[in-house]
Amino acid sequence: MEARTTLANAPSLQERAYRIRRNALRMGEVQGQGYIAQALGVADVLATAYFHALRYRPEDPYWDGRDRFLLSIGHYAIALYAALIEAGIIPENELNSYGSDDSRLPMSGMAAYTPGMEISGGSLGIGLGIAVGMGLGLKRKGSDRFVYNLMSDGELDEGPTWEAAMSASHWQLGNLICLVDVNRMQADGASAGVLNSEPLAPKWDAFGWHVQRVDGNDIGALVQAFDAARALAEPKPRVIICDTRMAKGVPFLETREKSHFMRVERNEWAQALEALDAGRTA
């Protein structure tokens, strides 16, 4: 059995994204911290990936026939855990262990700890290179599975990212789909001010990739982009550039001054959950 959203009684992708956001906020409240703005922003991308595109078995996260989903941005772990919980790969009752000693949900993604976490993320810019290696291996085995790599726009500052992009094109890795979360913020400030990587689409195109750029908080647009990337017959890697809004779904956080690590006060976690819930029913 492969996870799909085609069942008539399956929750909508919008509902999945809401639940992913809620899981992330609940984990953030446990520790009083976490990269919550990024998690809320990328939730729609994760919902589309896990409940529309990816092939996997929740009961067997290391099933050889799975698509691979790589989290290059290790500090987004809270976002991926939220999706893995919603997907049934991690039990919901582990949510309250986030960031605690002996937890399977450390604050930065660790493949050795967490079911469904394909790689450990620490130093940024390594994910796409690993994805190229996985894609090449699967291609040589004759597998029809895809490798997805979720990375940040900040990682476009790193030279290894572009070496990997060039390699993927050289090896004609039609099984590689890169997802770039463009939220325009990184550790040292606004991405454009640290090292401006725009215009992104022409750059990826020049490196030999099939390029799409979409609103990363528009699930309809994301579904179309994922479908087009998977259906492309041409043997070339595919990239979906996703423009996202940090803290999406919680209005008072959306309008807060943006920073790489958004400060959320102790009393604001419950308020954030209330705001998210209100948006769901609005």
Image: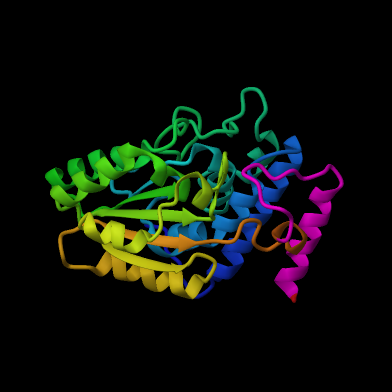
Q: Which residues, given as a range, are shown in magenta?
A: 255-281
Q: Residue at x 46, y 57 (%)?
A: 50
Among all residues in the image, which is located at the extreme front? Answer: 193
| Quadrant of the frame with the N terminus | bottom left
Q: Is residue 248 left or right of residue 265?
A: left
Percent x, y of residue 184: 53, 54
Residue 103 coordinates in the image, percent (x, y): 61, 28
What colour-coding does the image apply?
A: rainbow
Residue 96 visible somewhere in the drawing: yes
Residue 275 located left or right of residue 221: right
Can residue 61 be seen in this snapshot? no
Please say if 109 is above or below 209. above
Q: How many marks?
A: 0
- Viewer-closest of 246 and 8: 246
Residue 98 x %, y %: 66, 35
Q: Would you say residue 257 sits in the magenta stretch?
A: yes
Which quadrant of the figure has residue 9? bottom right
Q: Quadrant of residue 213?
A: bottom left
Residue 133 is left or right of residue 19, and the answer is: left
Q: Nearer the viewer, residue 14 or 41?
A: 41
Task: Tell me the quadrant of the picture where the C terminus can be found.
Answer: bottom right
Residue 55: in magenta span: no
Q: Residue at x 79, y 49 (%)?
A: 269
Q: Which of 8 and 160 lies nearest the eye of the viewer?
A: 160
